[in-house]
């Protein structure tokens, strides 16, 4: 056996443990009875610990050395060279963090989550503040262990968006913000131009489910290698390249919940199903980063799923499925209703135009907290002021303000920006695909998503984690990550709808 083969066998074990943990996690959120929670937490902790130990063992270090000599002749982009590069990175990072700190963070966040749930219910930030302070302090320690050059934020961001720097995000996001704020302001003066009451009529759960499954299938989601179930919070998870699951939730009084939720998760799942089979059972069998992942979900949900082209094909079918609620509705008024914009307090309910302003606020605040430029006691006030400045509205209480997201209580600091990166990139990728496939929109008019999916497979999906996010963007689009294409897309689309 060569060292490379031996290394792959070891990594295969890590991948099996992670896959098994994913099955347990999926079950926890779909079918597990509430009584199973305590035992499930133990089972997940055990699998996580075994996978971590298997990855950071000295033996992996030795095998990495040995395998490096064996693949020295193969090109930098070969599966083998990329595997060694990625595993070395994972290995070195994982070894930098003392197990005691990992355990302390696990404890503080599981406690923090509980306290956050209560604090949000009571809409009282001060009762969450000590727990959040503890989580923040531990993440400063984590950043010190991982190491950074410019900001401790970089070390945390790197866990979700490898290779990205805070300073780079500040540059891209300030351009984004200076374009978004005036656009939101001018749309805010014309809110009555679009009405979405039609989406709040009655839509039966069964018909919504069937319609969603039909859409997923037509987009290219392979039900032989996946399935859809229900969960409170929709998600995508993969146990292997050949078993990628999605979940959705259905609201009979609000059509977009299941419809766009399914499109979103389907975008994540198409990515995971599209990774090259050669990468199966290795650490490369997954998305390049959270930002790249979100670019896939947003591309299908928004760029495709909220376009006229998409609904030229699907609207007559939707009308057939919901005759009573939609027979008096035109394609045009349906298109406008699903693209309604309104500044609102809650991020997860925000439209395409206002969404990123929610993220930019969180990014700014968590950066300031981590770098010690904002005291936790001043966070609610800073939050409210930021909302007022960028969206023109202020939360009436903490529950609809600073306490609304689960992320910080869960220790996910440096995670929020990946949502906006995904949005920016969704447009850059779609426009690149359109430039090389001139008939792309005509194909979508016909319900033919094959050419778009094939382009994404070729340029993004098949590579899995082989390349870092920014080099992957360069390869796929021929240029760097930018805010301008996204701003153009929004201005074109919403000027036509609102002006
Ligand atoms: Zn997503």
Image: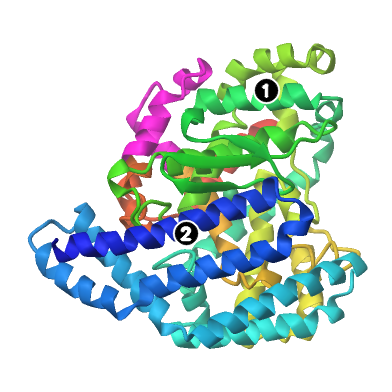
Q: Position of residue 148 (x, y in %)?
A: 42, 83
Q: Is residue 117 above or below residue 430?
A: below
Q: Secondary structure at mark 1?
A: helix
Residue at screen point 19% across, 53% down: 78
- The region drawn magenta spans 429-458
Mark 2 highlights which residue? 18
Residue 112 drawn above or below residue 140: above
Rendering quarter of residue 395: bottom right
Which quadrant: the C terminus? Answer: top right
Q: Nearer the viewer, residue 412 or 14?
A: 14
Relative height, residue 309 to residue 367 (above, below): above
Figure coloring: rainbow
Task: Residue at 89%, 74% (x, y): give it.
Answer: 124
Q: State left or right for residue 412 relative to residue 454.
A: right
**Residue 19: percent from left, percent from top:** 47, 54
Q: How many marks?
A: 2
- Which type of secondary structure does the marked residue at label 2 adopt? helix
Q: Is residue 183 visible?
A: no
Residue 66 drawn at (x, y percent): 15, 72
Q: Is residue 254 visible?
A: yes
What residue is disc 1 on? 210
């Amino acid at each position: 056996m060569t060292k490379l083969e031996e290394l792959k066998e070891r990594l295969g074990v890590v991948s099996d443990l992670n896959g098994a943990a994913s099955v347990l996690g999926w079950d926890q959120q779909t079918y597990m009875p509430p009584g199973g929670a305590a035992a499930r937490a133990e089972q997940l902790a055990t699998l996580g610990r075994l996978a971590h130990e298997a990855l950071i063992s000295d033996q992996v270090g030795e095998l990495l050395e040995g395998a490096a000599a064996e693949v020295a002749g193969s090109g930098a982009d070969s599966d083998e060279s990329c595997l060694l590069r990625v595993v070395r990175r994972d290995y070195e990072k994982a070894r930098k963090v003392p197990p005691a700190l990992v355990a302390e963070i696990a404890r503080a966040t599981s406690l923090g989550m509980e306290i956050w749930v209560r604090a949000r219910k009571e809409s009282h930030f001060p009762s969450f503040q000590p727990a959040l302070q503890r989580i923040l302090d531990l993440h400063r320690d984590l950043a010190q262990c991982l190491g950074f050059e410019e900001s401790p934020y970089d070390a945390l961001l790197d866990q979700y968006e490898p290779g990205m720097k805070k300073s780079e995000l500040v540059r891209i996001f300030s351009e984004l913000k200076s374009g978004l704020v005036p656009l939101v302001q001018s749309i805010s003066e014309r809110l009555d131009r679009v009405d979405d009451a039609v989406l709040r009529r009655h839509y039966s759960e069964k018909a919504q489910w069937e319609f969603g499954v039909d859409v997923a299938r037509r987009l290219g989601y392979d039900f032989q290698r996946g399935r859809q179930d229900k969960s409170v919070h929709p998600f995508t998870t993969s146990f292997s390249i050949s078993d990628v699951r999605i979940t959705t939730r259905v609201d009979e009084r609000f059509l977009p919940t299941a419809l766009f939720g399914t499109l979103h998760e389907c975008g994540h799942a198409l990515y995971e199903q599209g990774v090259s089979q050669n990468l199966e059972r290795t650490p490369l069998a997954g998305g390049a980063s959270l930002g790249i992942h979100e670019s896939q979900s947003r591309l299908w949900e928004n760029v495709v799923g909220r376009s006229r082209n998409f609904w030229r094909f699907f609207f007559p079918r939707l009308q057939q499925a919901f005759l009573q609620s939609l027979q008096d509705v035109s394609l045009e008024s349906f298109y406008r209703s699903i693209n309604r914009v309104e500044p609102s307090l809650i991020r997860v309910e925000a439209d395409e135009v206002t969404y990123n302003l929610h993220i930019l606020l969180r990014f700014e605040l968590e950066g300031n907290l981590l770098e010690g430029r904002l005291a936790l006691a001043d966070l609610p006030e800073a939050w409210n002021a930021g909302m007022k400045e960028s969206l023109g509205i202020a939360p009436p209480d903490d529950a609809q303000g600073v306490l609304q997201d689960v992320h910080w209580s869960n220790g996910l600091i440096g995670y929020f920006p990946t949502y906006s990166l995904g949005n920016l990139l969704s447009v850059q990728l779609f426009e690149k695909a359109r430039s090389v496939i001139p008939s792309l929109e005509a194909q979508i008019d016909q319900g033919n998503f094959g050419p778009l999916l094939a382009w994404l497979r070729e340029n993004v999906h098949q590579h899995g984690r082989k390349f870092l996010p920014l080099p992957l963007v360069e390869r796929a689009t021929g240029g760097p990550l930018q805010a301008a294409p996204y701003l153009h897309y929004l201005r074109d689309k919403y000027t036509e709808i609102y002006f």
